[in-house]
Amino acid sequence: METIEDRAAFIDEALRFSDIIFLTLGSSFAEGVDMLGGKIKAVMVVSPALPEVNPVQQYKREYYKNRNQDGFERAYLQPGIQKVNQALGRLVRAPGQSVKALLQCHRFADTKTRSLLANQYRECNYIFNDDDLNDWLERESQINPPQKI
């Protein structure tokens, strides 16, 4: 089993030699996102980190539904968006740090989902197709041109 030191070494090496790092919320690297604070300029979150569908989550969903609450929101959506908020918050740890976040999933365009995001992530541009994405990437590259090392 890998240690925290192993994960830190992996992330440090990836930051030195890679343009892109893929990490999964809820994986052993979830807490390792702290190590990225102030070191990256952009992040893409691919879908809310919804909990696994299992008997415990289904019980929670029914529990809230039987109390006239939105069972899906309480059992799945709120915990998933909380993980997204926590991960994004770990990327900016000190004054002067910033990161561009691309939230990639139709769920992020939903009013209910957006209301669960931290305030700083609620106002955004919407990208619905490849042309929108290419336009956004072009604007971003003009604002923050890639730096050669």
Image (tube, grey):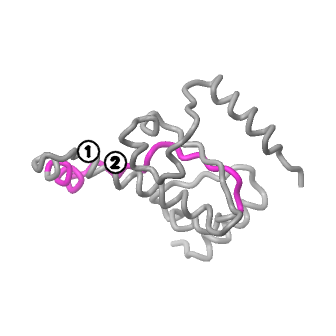
Q: Mark 2, residues whose alpha carbon is within 10 Å: few (<14), some, or many (≥20)?
A: many
Quarter the C terminus occupies? bottom right
Side of 36 relative to 118 (left or right): right
Residue contact at pointers 2 and 1, CB within 8 angstroms = yes
Magenta stretch contains residue 41: yes
Q: Mark 1, residues whose alpha carbon is within 10 Å: few (<14), some, or many (≥20)?
A: some
- Residue on which the image places disc 1: 72
Q: Furthest-right residue in view?
A: 149
Q: Relative to residue 131, is residue 126 depicted above or below?
A: below
Report the magenta residues as a range: 39-62
- Label annotation for residue 77: 2
Question: Image point 69% across, 64% down: which residue?
Answer: 38
Side of 102 relative to 70 (left or right): right
- Label annotation for residue 90: none
Instruction: Residue type at mark 2: give it.
Output: Leu
Percent across and percent down for residue 121 are 53, 48
Percent across and percent down for residue 59 are 16, 53
Looking at the rendered structure, the secondary structure element under dot 1 is helix
Question: Image point 41% across, 57% down: which residue?
Answer: 82
Instruction: Residue type at mark 1: give it.
Output: Phe
Q: Relative to residue 121, is residue 138 depicted above or below?
A: above
Question: Image point 49% across, 52% down: which residue?
Answer: 119
Q: Furthest-left residue in view?
A: 66
Question: Image point 21% across, 46% down: which residue?
Answer: 71
Q: Earlier in the sequence, mark 2 or mark 1?
A: 1
* Displayed quadrant of residue 35: bottom right
* Displayed quadrant of residue 4: bottom right
Q: Relative to residue 97, is residue 84 depicted above or below?
A: above
Percent across and percent down for residue 24 are 51, 54
Looking at the rendered structure, the secondary structure element under dot 2 is helix
Relative depth, front residue between 60 and 82 = 82
